[in-house]
Image (cartoon, rainbow, N blue to C red):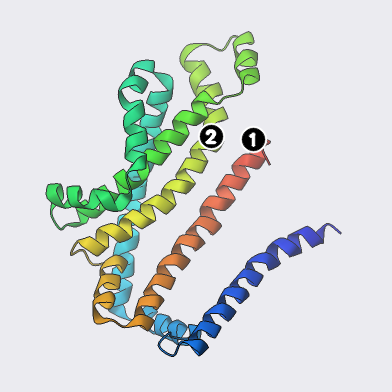
């Protein structure tokens, strides 16, 4: 009986994929101009073996890794400062919310103005497009530490910096991890926006080039690949990490 929930959990995504493929195929049958999923899959498979496409994919991956590393450092660092020091919260608390509220694509013109049509502009777009949510979630995690944990730690003599690092920060970890998971999605979208609007070679730039040709099947193939990469990284890394942290902290 214990296998049934696991089997159901495994089958649900397959059922969703089968439904979407069936709907896509039906649309292709009813609308002659709409490419079938098999044609798009064939184009996608051919693109993956193209050296130029592989170079673009590697470039996007490199920029995302650099940008996301900066997001982690800046987002968690400033989030801890905002949650720990009231003066910093007064100065930067609203700034973090404002940065989070601005879509990643909106940072691209500013990035181009400062860095030109360069890779640094794309990385800057990722940073500002995703760091805000990490700041906000880290700050929220610090503020939402259960009062029972606070009282227990203080009763045992935890004070000052030791209390913050060994009680508050570990208790806030689930929220921090949730912020990092959301930051991946925001950063991935910001990366595509940055590459679409700059001359930097990458998936976004190739998507823009295909859109100008009007080739719907190729456009859908690139969009599908971008979506699959985003979902795969979230499911294989961040969703598992978040679940492991929640289990470790007794939240799941």
Foreground residue among 45 and 210: 210
Residue at position x 80%, y 62% in the image: 4
**Residue count near mark 2 (Cα–Cα under 10 Å), binned few <14, some 14–19, many ≥20:** some
Which comes sooner in the sequence, label 1 or label 2? 2
Q: Is residue 11 above or below residue 90?
A: below
Please name the residue shown 31% across and 31% down the image: 95
Q: Is residue 73 visible?
A: no
Vertical arrangement, residue 85 with respect to residue 44, above or below: above
Image point (19%, 61%), residue name: 198
Classify 10 Å Cα crowding around label 1: few (below 14), some (14-19), many (20 and above): few
- Residue 221 rendering spot, x and y as whole percentages: 40, 77
CB under 8 Å between callouts 1 and 2?
A: yes
Q: Is mark 1 on a helix, strand or loop?
A: loop
How many numbered marks, from 0 up?
A: 2
Residue indicated by mark 2: 173
Q: What SS does tag 2 mark?
A: helix
- Apparent side of residue 165 relative to residue 193 in the rendered image (left or right): right
Q: Where does the N terminus fall, quadrant-wise?
A: bottom right
Residue 62 locus on image (x, y percent): 32, 58
Residue named by callout 1: 249
| Direction from residue 100 to residue 146 in the image, left or right | right
């Amino acid at each position: 009986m214990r296998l049934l929930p696991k089997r159901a959990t495994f089958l649900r995504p397959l059922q969703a994929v089968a439904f979407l493929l069936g709907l896509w195929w039906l649309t292709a049958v009813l609308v002659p101009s709409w490419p079938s999923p098999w044609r798009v899959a064939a184009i996608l498979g051919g693109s993956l073996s193209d050296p130029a496409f592989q170079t673009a994919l590697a470039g996007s991956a490199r920029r995302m890794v650099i940008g996301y590393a900066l997001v982690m450092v800046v987002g968690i660092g400033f989030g801890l400062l905002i949650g720990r020091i009231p003066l910093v919260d007064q100065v930067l608390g609203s700034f973090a919310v404002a940065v989070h509220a601005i879509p990643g694509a909106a940072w691209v013109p500013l990035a181009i103005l400062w860095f030109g049509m360069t890779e640094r502009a794309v990385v800057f777009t990722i940073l500002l497009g995703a760091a805000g949510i990490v700041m906000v979630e880290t700050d929220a995690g610090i503020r939402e530490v259960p009062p029972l944990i606070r009282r227990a730690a203080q009763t045992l003599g935890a004070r000052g910096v030791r209390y913050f690092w060994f009680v508050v920060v570990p208790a806030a970890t689930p929220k921090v991890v949730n912020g990092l998971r959301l930051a991946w999605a925001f950063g991935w979208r910001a990366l595509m926006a940055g590459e679409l609007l700059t001359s930097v070679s990458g998936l976004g730039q190739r998507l823009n080039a295909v859109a100008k040709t009007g080739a719907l099947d190729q456009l859908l193939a690139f969009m599908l690949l971008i979506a699959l990469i985003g979902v795969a990284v979230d499911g294989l890394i961040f969703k598992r990490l978040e679940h492991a942290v929640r289990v470790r902290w007794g939240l799941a």
